[in-house]
Image: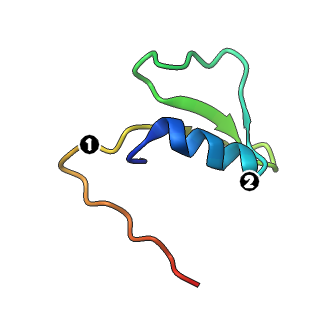
């Protein structure tokens, strides 16, 4: 779950993910990607009831 799917799209691509073919952006199901090892994952909007994930600070 992410606060901004469009912003997260850029981040996951920069980290090596690729959008899977057949994924329909904006279809209400989130965007489907594969990580560099090929594992699928989705980016979905965080609902208002879900607590934000704290950023890890190095």
At x 81% / y 49%, what residue is drawn?
Answer: 36
- Asked where in the image residue 27 lies, by quadrant, the reply is top left
**One can see residue 49 in this view:** yes
Residue 10 marker: none
Mark 2: few/some/many CA within 10 Å (<14, 14-19, 20+)? few
Give the secondary structure at mark 1. loop
Q: Is residue 39 visible?
A: no
Residue 41 location, x and y as percent?
60, 41
From the image, tell me which residue sits under label 2. 15
Vertical relation: 49 (above or below) 23 = below
Q: Nearer the viewer, residue 27 or 41?
A: 27
Q: From the image, which quarter does the C terminus lie in? A: bottom right
Closer to the camera, 49 or 11?
11
Q: Between marks 1 and 2, how big is the CA–CA gap?
A: 24 Å
Position of residue 51 in the picture relative to residue 56 (left or right): left
| Image spot of residue 3 (x, y percent) | 38, 47
Measuring from the top left, give residue 10's x and y in whole percent. Answer: 64, 42
Q: Is residue 29 above or below residue 5?
A: above
CB contact under 8 Å: marks 1 and 2: no
Q: Is residue 12 left or right of residue 42?
A: right
* Residue marked by disc 1: 47
The local crowd at label 1, few if under 14, some if 14 to 19, many if 20 or more residues have their Cα within 10 Å, is few
Sooner in the amino-acid sequence: mark 1 or mark 2: 2
Looking at the picture, does residue 7 appear above or below residue 58? above
**In terms of secondary structure, where does tag 2 sit?**
loop
Which of the two marks, 1 or 2, is nearer to us in this view? 2
Residue at left 73%, top 19%?
21
Residue plotted at (51% across, 35% down):
6
């Amino acid at each position: 779950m992410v606060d901004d799917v469009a912003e997260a799209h850029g981040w996951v691509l920069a980290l090596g993910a690729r959008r899977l073919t057949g994924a329909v952006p904006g279809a209400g199901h989130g965007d489907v990607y594969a990580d560099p090892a090929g594992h699928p994952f989705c980016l979905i909007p965080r609902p208002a009831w879900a607590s934000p994930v704290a950023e890890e600070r190095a």
